[in-house]
Amino acid sequence: GRGGGGRGGGGSPAAEQVAMTAANQALIGGLLNTLGGGSQLQRHHQPHDADATRHDDASEHRADVDPEDVERKAWQALEKKGFTAEVVSRAMRATARAVVVEGDRKEAFNEQKRRRVHRGLDWLILNCDESELPSAFTEEAQKERKKRGGGGKKKKNEGDDDDDDD
């Protein structure tokens, strides 16, 4: 025959539990629903953060777009702008939920990548220490932080008072 995937199990009805983020669960649930077998999975096993999978568009995705490829290309684009892998990682984690909530997975590859890069860049500009920003983004970060009432500078040592050179 076709083999059983090497796990055996003998038809035991006990379900195996897998821990994953709500975003990944929504993605897997969407893939399974597209293939015709996942509707029971999503109803049966709600994640701790169930709001992410309850969004109407959360299970919609394009089968012709590889989400890992979108993530990899967005990551590379942010690194190309001069951000380190460490801060890019923080930005990608911090903005991952928006991919599910805003239904990005139903968009074409280029739109998914554009959204991912822009969200990551916005997060980096607003949340990174000034020392972690590439020089090209320092001035923009100061302006955006002032708009949000953040004082313009985000440094690890807040003792420097050189805001007077405007």
Image (cartoon, grey):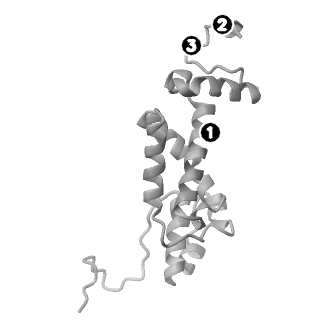
Q: Which quadrant: the N terminus?
A: bottom left
Nearest the eye: 122 or 28: 122
At a point 30% along the width and 85% down the height, the residue shown is 10
- Where, by quadrant of the figure, is residue 139 drawn? top right
Q: Which structural element holds mark 1?
A: helix
Above or below, comparing residue 96 to residue 79 in the picture: below
Distance Cα–Cα, label 3 vs label 2: 10 Å
Which amino acid type is marked by label 3?
A: Asn
At a point 61% along the width and 8% down the height, the residue shown is 159
Residue hosting label 1 = 122
Mark with earlier residue (2, 1): 1
Q: Residue 131 at x, y = what percent?
A: 51, 21
Distance Cα–Cα, label 2 vs label 1: 25 Å
Residue hosting label 2 = 161
Tell me, yes or no, whether the two marked residues, 3 and 2, touch with CB atoms within 8 Å: no
Mark 1 vs mark 3: in front: 1
Which amino acid type is marked by label 1?
A: Asp
Q: Which structural element holds mark 2?
A: loop
Nearest the eye: 76 or 132: 76
Q: Which structural element holds mark 3?
A: loop
Residue 97's disc is none
Tell me, yes or no, whether the two marked residues, 2 and 1, touch with CB atoms within 8 Å: no
Classed neighbour count for the residue bearing mark 1: other residues with Cα under 10 Å, few (<14), some (14–19), many (≥20): some
Residue 157's disc is 3
Mark with earlier residue (1, 3): 1
Which amino acid type is marked by label 2?
A: Asp
- Left-right relation of 63 to 100: left
Q: Residue 161 at x, y = what percent?
A: 65, 7
